[in-house]
Image (tube, rainbow, N blue to C red):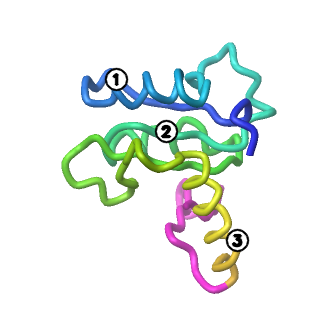
Amino acid sequence: MNTKNIKYFTTNLTRAIKIVNELQQKYNILPLSNQNECSSIETIIVIGDDGVFLQALKNFLHLKVGFYGINVGNLGFLMNSYNCKHDLIEQIYFAKQSLLIHYKQRYLIMMVLKKKSVSLLTSALF
């Protein structure tokens, strides 16, 4: 997996700074911003709590990319735990492979966007 196709998204959570620094130094992963070439992005790493993850989905779901959440909040129901001893790129790869294997059997999270009872968008998330 090419790390040039991976960007990260976070808010100004002080607990996320350590992970952000490691993503930049160890993997050369840059933040998702307006300057980035969005057409080449394959995965967005979301660093924060469940609210940040939902905000990222709202802002970037139209890109039709994979989302991988790293929890720095309390519960992190939608997120993964982070361990600097494990290879993050490998974890993302296996998360994608797991989704592909089980895609026809079940969705991990199904999102349906509706406006006045009309379904505008349906998407499976991992």
Quarter of image, res 17: top left
Q: Nearer the viewer, residue 56 or 4?
A: 4
28 above or below 92? above
Q: Earlier in the sequence, mark 2 or mark 1?
A: 1
Residue at 63% from the left image edge and 50% from the top image edge? 66
Q: Amino acid at mark 2?
A: Ala
C-alpha span from label 2 to label 1: 17 Å
Expressed as whole percent of the image width and height from the top left, the position of residue 2 reads 75, 39
Q: Which residue is mark 2?
A: 56
Closer mark to the observer between disc 2 and disc 1: 1
Residue where numbered disc 1 is placed = 17
Q: Are marks 3 and 2 in contact (CB under 8 Å)?
A: no
Eye-nearest disc, 3 or 2? 3
The magenta span reads 105-126
Residue occupied by mark 3 = 100
Residue sitting nearer the eye, 18 or 87: 87
- Residue for point 60% across, 53% down: 90
